[in-house]
Image (cartoon, rainbow, N blue to C red):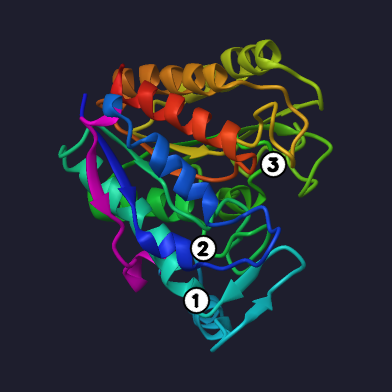
Amino acid sequence: MTTLLVSHPSCAFHDTGPHHPECPDRVRVIMESLGAVNFAGLRRQRAPFIEREAILRVHPVRYIDAIEAACPASGRVYLDPDTVMSEKSYEAIARSAGGAAAAVDAVMAGDADNAFVAMRPPGHHAGMASPMGFCFFNNAAIAARHAKAAYGAERVAIFDFDVHHGNGTQEIFWFDPSVLYASTHQMPLYPGTGGRDEKGEHGNIVNVPLAAGDDGSRFRTAVATQILPRMSDFRPDLIIISAGFDGHMDDPLGGLRLTESDFAWATEKAMEIAAKFAKGRVVSVLEGGYGLRGLSCSAAAHVSALTGA
């Protein structure tokens, strides 16, 4: 099993300010954990700057221009109470999306079996024309549309296990039957979307909310009984994982009680479906995860599962 790890040092220069949970240390601790000897077999690649054409498949030109223009010459600017840019943020934003597209390139071309994109900022709260919840461009959505446009993928499944619902991804694909968006998340919790009755125009949205305090057993039951069957029925050509690790029991922003073994299990189950329908092709993009110890351990377990170890 060949697993590609995509990252870039520009992640560290997206300065969100002191005490902000979406901080440079998030990628630092992940890369440190993936530097262990048992990950020596990973293929590693620097995330490229995203091509504008790839962003335009998801976000309108005025929005792209507005995000680029919002980057301050110095200091920081807040696009909403949670979403902040500094002078070097745009490169990190563009390379985060570019890393997702590059991972699709590698997996769809057969250069890697699967990939993990360890980049920040995350993306799943970003709508077609709205930054939100630490997110600017929707990396998972860009990856999905890139797979369709560049490689002819007919059906792409996005499996989102972040503790927060990916409202932006849901919005983008609400009317698109070629993309299945399936999410487990805590409710009630930010951003307040993700009810079971939110199913998309073509029934291609699957929301399975969990309650604060739910543990790995409840998470696994929800995934096994409601998400995996829908993904199998969809028969995807590619699976994209919105890999948020803030459902970990140590995370300060969530209330679930998952452990790293739960994320590894979910990854393995997604890989089983990919092996059956998608030639094993899985692209995982980092979303949330704000308790550094839990994030580090969970990302390592996730990537270990991707490698088949």
Horizontal arrangement in the rendering, residue 4 relative to residue 124 (left or right)? left
Q: How far apart are marks 1 and 3 (CA)?
A: 24 Å
Q: What stretch is highlighted in magenta?
A: 39-55
Query: Where is mark 1, residue-wise?
Result: 64
* Residue 94 in view here: yes
Instruction: Report if residue 52 lies within the magenta region.
Output: yes
Query: Where is mark 2, residue-wise?
Result: 137
Quarter-wise, where is residue 5 in the image? top left
The percent coordinates of residue 32 (x first, y second) are 40, 40
Q: How far apart are marks 1 and 2 (CA)?
A: 8 Å
Instruction: Report if residue 119 lies within the magenta region.
Output: no
**Label 1: which secondary element:** helix
- Work out whether residue 89 or residue 49 is closer to the camera in this orientation and state it: 89
Seen in the picture, residue 8 relative to 201 is either above or below; the reply is: below
- Work out whether residue 37 or residue 227 is closer to the camera in this orientation and state it: 37
- The quadrant of the picture occupied by the C terminus is top left
Proximity of marks 1 and 3: CB atoms separated by less than 8 Å: no
* Residue 233 in view here: no
Circle 2 residues within 10 Å: few <14, some 14–19, many ≥20: many
Three-letter code, disc 3 = His
Horizontal arrangement in the rendering, residue 129 relative to residue 305 (left or right)? right
**Label 3: which secondary element:** loop
Query: Where is mark 3, residue-wise?
Result: 164
Three-letter code, disc 1 = Ile
Residue occupying the point 47% across, 20% down: 264
Residue occupying the point 69% across, 35% down: 251
